[in-house]
Image: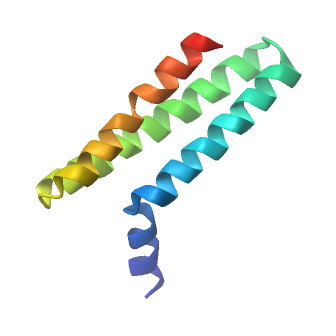
Amino acid sequence: MRKEKLMQTILNWKFVYTFWVISYIVDIIFFILGGKSLITGILPSIFWGILGITTIIIGCFHIRRKHWIDALLYFCLFPFPLIANLIK
């Protein structure tokens, strides 16, 4: 039962968007407080990369199930950190 609930939560785009927003706010806070050190530059890049790959995989899963709108919502998340990091 727990595994099914976890999968439903991961596949829920509202939860994932909320997680991305919170992650981005934490990233901005670390950027402001930490400056431009090596750790604050590499760790967020790895985190955003893993998160981006994960959302692409979930988007492909939605395409396979023919849930086009959900897939589009997940694919739109991938370029967000790239655009957001250009602003920083």
Question: Which residue occupies 40% across, 45% down?
Answer: 54
Residue 22 coordinates in the image, percent (x, y): 66, 45
Q: In the picture provided, is 34 more to the left or to the right than 9?
A: right
Where's the N terminus, which quadrant? Answer: bottom left
Query: As drawn, is 52 to the left or to the right of 20?
Result: left
Q: Is residue 87 above or below residue 13?
A: above
- Position of 40 compared to 15: left or right? right
Residue 11's x, y, as percent? 37, 62
Quadrant of the drawing holding the C terminus? top right
Depth order, front residue of 69/26:
69
Could you say which quadrant of the image residue 35 lies in? top right
In the orientation shown, which residue stands out farthest toward the bottom? 1
Q: Is residue 51 above or below residue 35?
A: below
**Residue at coordinates 46% horizontally, 58% vertically from top-left?**
14
At a point 79% along the width and 28% down the height, the residue shown is: 30
Q: Is residue 80 left or right of residue 57?
A: right
